[in-house]
Structure formats: structure tokens, C-alpha cells
Amino acid sequence: MLLNMFHNFHGKLIKQLCFVSIIIFPPSLNLLLLACEDESNIGILSTWVQMGASGDIIARVIAERLECPLIKLNDSFQEMQVRAAATEPDFPVLVCEIIIPPETDSASIEGRILMLPNNEPKRLAIIGDTGCRIAGDQAQPCNDPQQWPFKRVAKNVAAWGPDLVIHIGDYVYREAPCPEGNSGCAGSPFGDNWDTWDADFFSPASSLLRSAPWVIVRGNHEMCTREGNGWFRFLSPNVPFSECQDFTDPYPIDIGEVTLLILDSANADDNDAPENLVSIYSEQIAEINKLADNNFWLLSHRPIWGIGEFEHELFRINLTLQAATNNNLVAGINLVLSGHQHLFEKLSFVGGRAPQLIVGNSGTFLDSPITVPLSGLEIAGAIVDQGVSFDNFGFVTMERMGDGWNVSVRDVDGVEIIPCVIVENHFNCSQN
């Protein structure tokens, strides 16, 4: 309690001193400005930049403070706005944000440099399904970096030097207490609260959050019946809602050579196609089809077309999205990028259907490996021309080259395992 009181008093004092230096003595009190920039980050828990709708560049901070910190944009300081006030007992942290003007060249919060987006990023890193699973009869050893390697993945993605990070969804997997006597996950928090979000995402991802701006997609673990409150508090690009929302509108993010179309597919049923859900997602797909023009990628946590294997039986998903799209996206959507299945998978199709890329192998328990060739299989009325899977932990990188992208499927340490190339909607991988 006393420590928190000191944090809050210290932050408030520095904030007041900054305003004095800016408003009254802008040219002269360099020492106070230096204090604003180089404060020891007392109470600052996490900072990052993420992309939102309409080209918004959003700076966020999580803090153990009563008031939001100042943000330095170019040479001026501005107040950040409260996104979510601290609420005991589950979320005793303050969340602040500000929209960064597009002409901004530099940004920092109390000396922490914020990485601003490049108008035409050339190096993209993709991760998905990163949390440590504790649910039902599954208890992943969260304390073992070999068996839950997300922190290693994040550090190696950061070391690769991306211009933009895409997280394709599912951040928190600790939904039940660690079984008694299980040393692999002993001491783990669980549920939709700050301690769990911090353990599963913010702490292990800290190096990567600081290294590049992010595109952040909602997964099914961020449904309102699961970790939805934390999602809307911390990561949702939307303006704050008074309560958790089951559905949010699709939106585009222009990254230069490609425009990303973000679909909130958290509630799209994998194994059934209920009429109400098909109706909702049909409307959203219609909006996406209106937005699509020349070179667009659709980002949806749940794949439209995914093939998996469980107990030596193949399954195919997602029935809701297949019905909503009628298995036909408009020309110009050249890729569907997803997670949800806990492996890497690439499916391209006979007949020109947009290829499906799945990156769900960045931390959580892996799915069963696919033991049959994917090429030649049928899904939703189309034959797989080339199917490739990788059933180990890792991430994917994309580097712009000419008219397309060099795509690398990498292991935890960043070693390339499968090289691929995508040009428009032609996606080919080489596999030994």
C-alpha cells in the first residue's frame, strides 16, 4: 500500500513539474524536461503501439498509478486518456491511451521509446495462440521455457527486427488453477484478470511489444464468456465499451503494398453453422468484400478453411465462416491469415480460391500432427493444390521482395524450416 502511494505521488509530482516546465518556462527548464523523459518508469508496467481502424496509431500504457503519464510526441508533451480505470480485485491497473497523429516522427513515455509504424513495412512477423494452456485435463508446464516457449519466441521475433508484428489471436489460456502438486505450472494465476494477462502475455511479450508496432486480432479465447473483459480493457482497438461485446465491426489497416482486413471471428462456430451466426458474419463479410480492391489480406483468428487431425481422424473447419462467405471471397483478397489451430498450415487451392495460412504454434499446447498428405484433400468444395504443415513451436516472417513476399516458417530460435513465396494469390512452399 505504502509503495503504491509513493508511486502515485511520485508520478503526480513529476507530471505537475512537466506541466510547469512546458507552460511557464519552455526554453529554460531543461533539467525538468529531462526528468520527464528519463523518469525511472515507477509504476509503468507495459507500453506499446498498435494499429487501429481508419489508420489510427494507438499508444497504450498499463500502469500502477492514479493518473495517466504524459507522452512526448516530437518535442511536446501531451496527456494520455484513461481507457480503463483500475478496478479491484481483478484489474488493479490503469490503462491509458492516445491516438498518435500520423505526422509524428517520435514518441516516448517517460523515456520509453515507442516504435511508430512505417508507411510501407517490409518485414512482417506473425505469431498466434501464445498463452500457456491450463484447462480441463490439460496443464501445460508454464514454468518450463522448453514446453511453453512464448517468451523465447517473442525475444527471437524481436531479434529478427520486424517493422510490424501481427498477433492473430488467443493471448490467455490459463483458465483453471494449476492441479495440486504439479510443479510444471505451480503458482500460476488463472482467469480473466490482470495477473493472468500479465503472466500469459504482457510479461513474456515485453521485449517484442517494445520492438515494433502491432496489429492485434481477437481470438476465441477473448470471447465474453472467457477473457473478453481483459481483451476490451487492454488490447481491443475499439473505443471503450461499457460492457463486453460479442461482435465488433471489421476494419481495414493500410500497410502500403497490402491492406489488412480485420475480422472479429471470435464467436464463429467451428463445427456448426447456426443461422444467427451465419447471418451476422454474412453481413460482415459483405462489408469486407466492399472494402477489398486490389491486394488485400483477410485476418481472422478462426480460419475459413482449416484441416486438422484428432485421434487419427481428419476434421475440417470453420462451418460458420464457410457458410457466411459461401466459400467465395471477392477477387483482390489474396490471402486468409489465421491462427486457432495449434500448428503451422498452408493450403492453396485448385481453381483460384485465396490461399489459407494458419499460424497457431507460438506457445500454447500444440495440436496433433497431421499424418496424411494435405495436397489432394478436399475442403468446402475445393481441392488442396499444395498443403504444408509444421507441428512444432515457432513463428512466421514475411519480407517484401519485388511484387511479392518471401515467407519463412521458423522454429522457436528463428531458424528457417520452410521457405515460401507469395505473389498476389499464388502461394508456394518448399519442403524437404
Image: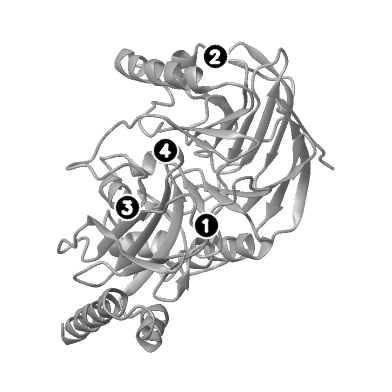
Query: Residue 141, relative to residue 221: is it above or below?
Result: below
Residue carrying label 1: 116
Marked residue nearer the N-terminal end (1 or 4): 4
Give the class, few, some or many, for how many residues have Cα within 10 Å of label 3's Cα (few <14, many ≥20).
some
Q: Is residue 418 above or below residue 202?
A: above
Q: Distance of mark 1 from mark 2, alpha carbons?
A: 36 Å
Which one is earlier in the sequence, the residue at label 3 or at label 2? 3
Q: Residues within 10 Å of mark 2 (few under 14, many from 20)?
A: some
Q: Earlier in the sequence, mark 3 or mark 4?
A: 4
Q: Locate residue 415, reporting x and y percent.
A: 74, 58
Per the model, the C-alpha gap separating discs 3 and 4 is 30 Å
Label 2: which residue?
A: 327
Lower sequence index among marks 4 and 2: 4
Query: Please, which residue is most extreme toward the right here?
Result: 432
Amino acid type of disc 4? Ala
Number of numbered tags placed on the structure image: 4
Q: Secondary structure at mark 2?
A: loop
Q: Is 17 in front, or is 172?
A: 17
Q: Secondary structure at mark 3?
A: loop
Judge depth for marks 3 and 4 and give the one in front. Answer: 4
Q: Residues within 10 Å of mark 1 (few under 14, many from 20)?
A: many
Rendering coords of residue 262 (x, y %): 47, 34
Image disc number at residue 347: none
How crowded is the residue under tag 4: few (<14 C-alpha within 10 Å), some, or many (20+)? some
**Viewer-nearest of discs 4 and 2:** 4
Residue 422's image quarter? Answer: top right
